[in-house]
Amino acid sequence: MKNQKGFSLIELLIVVVIIGIIAAIAIPNLLAARRSANEGSAISAMRTLHGAQMTYASTYGNGNYAGDVGAGTTQALADLGTPGLVDSVLATGTKSGYNFVGGRVAATTTSPAEFFFSANPTTTSGVTQTGARRFGIATNGVMMADAAAANLGTAFTQATVATATPLSN
């Protein structure tokens, strides 16, 4: 017999199987870490939006907050992005796998102005899921979170932000 050098087919198959096992263990952890990072980014963005609204009301809004009166839209984000109170990416309404919307209630003679923001994952199921919780924040500054699967695709409203469970991050 000749002196042959190299790997046999069995040896190569064993290496491929070992690599496959390692990938099967690592990929779910990587996806979970990405979802967690997206949620952390959304929480940070919500805190930024709260501070930006307070600044807007005292410097640009004459006591009123940025955005449309009523239901959540991206107008508040655009209004906060124009003077540079939030970065240009967040001002578009989508950042790190989350969609952001906001709304406000105008001040009256009997009640002060109020606002709210909501962050919802862009993809709510499957391998490409970008988050497992939705977030909301209102004028009082308390961050709210909701992990109910039925709610992930819908935005918090002024009423639901006020009654949701506070985030115990």
Image (spheres, rainbow, N blue to C red):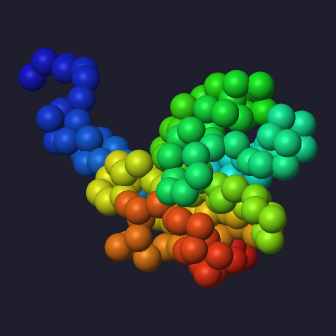
- The residue located at (71%, 35%) in the rendering is 80
**Where is residue 41 shown, x and y percent of the image?**
65, 47
- The residue located at (81%, 65%) in the rendering is 109
Q: Quadrant of residue 96?
A: top right
- The residue located at (35%, 73%) in the rendering is 150
Where 16 sits versus 154, above or below? above
**Where is residue 67 shown, x and y percent of the image?**
63, 43
**Where is residue 92 shown, x and y percent of the image?**
54, 31
How many marks on residues?
Answer: 0
Q: Quadrant of residue 88?
A: top right
Q: Quadrant of residue 137?
A: bottom right
Is 84 left or right of 74, judged from the image as shown? right
Residue placed most toward the observer, 97 or 13: 97
Is 164 left or right of 169, judged from the image as shown? left
- The residue located at (85%, 42%) in the rendering is 62
Residue placed most toward the observer, 166 or 36: 166
Where 92 sits versus 32, above or below? above
Residue 8 in view (yes/no): yes
- Furthest residue to the left? 1
Where 74 sits versus 105, above or below? above
Quadrant placement of the N terminus: top left
Residue placed most toward the observer, 148 or 137: 137
